[in-house]
Image (tube, rainbow, N blue to C red):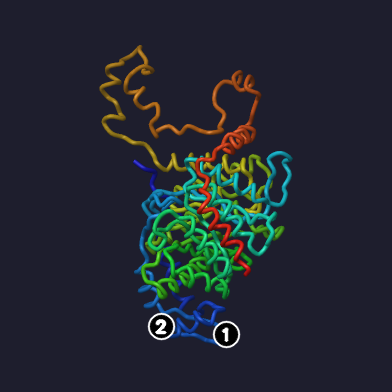
Amino acid sequence: MQLSKMEVLSDAEIKQIHETTLDILENCGVKIDNSKMLSFLREKGLFVDSNKQIVRFSRTCIEDALSHIPSQFEVYDREGELAFILGDGQSKIAAGHNAVFWLDSDTGQTRTSTIADVELFARICNELKCIDMVGIPVMPQDVPDPKASLLYGVRAVVENTRKPIYFSTDNGKVNRAVINMLESAFGGDFKTCAYGITQLSPTSPLCWEGGVIDAIIDTLETAVPIAILPEPNAGVSSPYTLAGLLTVNNAECISGLVMIQLLKPGAKVMYANSWTTTDMRTGAALVGSIETSICRIAGAQLAKFYGVPSHTTAPNSDNHAHDEQNAWEKTFSTFAAVAAGNDLIVNCGMLATGMTCSHEQLIMDEEISAMAKRISAGINVNKETIACELIKQIGHEANYLTSEHTLSRLRSNEYLIPRVSIRGPRASWEAEGKKDTYMLAKEKIKEYSKSDSSVLELERAARLAEIISGFNE
């Protein structure tokens, strides 16, 4: 059987957070800096204070809106083939996005990112079995128009992997340009099929910026699903307690989901989170702390309570180096996210509190993710796998090496075959150069960089270039 879903909240505690959320949204409300949305919500019968830009949501409105959210939806690859279903109970892993810097493979130094970095990142993702979706890792800095930096990042990813795309913006114009690019590259029916997912975030505490609302409204004219991802910081933009952090995240997320369902009932959405805790000794925001991993479990429970597909971040680390701390923070955060049943887990390839990307980190993170998913899959117990007759047949002194039962299962999914983990005797390891996992990951990069099986053909690539060139016209 599969591993039971990890839980940290009781049913009573979930209900208490839910009831508190309703109280906040009914009696405090959220601030929305967008006149179009304010007018729309007023027409829907909600309380709107135009001067303060505050909207309050009634319990009835919230419950009715949430009832329209689909519990799962299909996601397609660039060529229009079904890639996976979000909400089917199986966690999907995505490479991270929205970092700033790149850790250079040759020098080991952190530097500004380039288009070439993103292109190679996407090619590696295309080769990694456990990467289901690809985020835009950075907005490359070597571009002719900084305002269109994200668009160059999107093009670099789309042109170099078939896998579905995950992106985020805070600007309606950029959001629309990205959607146009995805539509131009997609080989299926973009009006009905989800090829890309957009992440849109409120500003904690309890505020929605005008550009984000514009992006929500614009996106709902398409079939692109929206992940509402609040980013409250414990003790800074939310209460310092984990329960308070969860509640602010919940209130902000629910307010976004409700607005979307009022605009377009049945729209595909995700309950998401990227909360941070705070080291009050330094003021540092933390994504790899063990407390954020506890919250990843709680977030999955809350999403399940509302019947909405969930998204969280992992593997996460706050360290700046590929070392033991990096490994243990990433392992805990990923296992917590997978074991709790989060549907989409985004951040492979990132370190340093999500500020830096690394090709080597991407390969190591994929292995961590594969291990977490393997634990979650559990053990398949039935008559064939128990093999009672075989055990009796082999008896006391023979072995199982050449039995058909063994040979037929050598390539089964029961045993995970690692890409870079070191196994075997020390003598063999020394004979092969005493390479550690980081060195082995570097070798994998060279291998994957030669692949061009996923490169987009010229006609569709030319359409992407046209959208970028016309962005500021």
Q: Secondary structure at mark 1?
A: loop
Residue for point 37% across, 78% down: 60
Q: Badge 1: how crowded within 10 Å, few (<14), some, or many (20+)?
A: few
> Which of the two labelled residues, at mark 1 and mark 2, occupies the earlier sequence position?
2
Which label belongs to residue 375?
Answer: none
Name of the residue lying farthest toward the top: 397
Q: Report how many numbered discs are placed on residues in the image.
A: 2
Residue for point 63% across, 19% down: 431
Which label belongs to residue 44?
Answer: 2
- Give the residue type at disc 1: Lys
What is the C-alpha distance between the residues marked 1 and 2?
A: 19 Å
Residue for point 38% across, 18% down: 401
Q: Is residue 244 visible?
A: no
Which of 352 and 16 lies nearest the eye of the viewer?
A: 352
Which of 455 and 36 lies nearest the eye of the viewer?
A: 455
Nearer mark to the viewer, of 1 and 2: 2
Q: Which residue is mark 1?
A: 52
- Give the residue type at disc 2: Lys
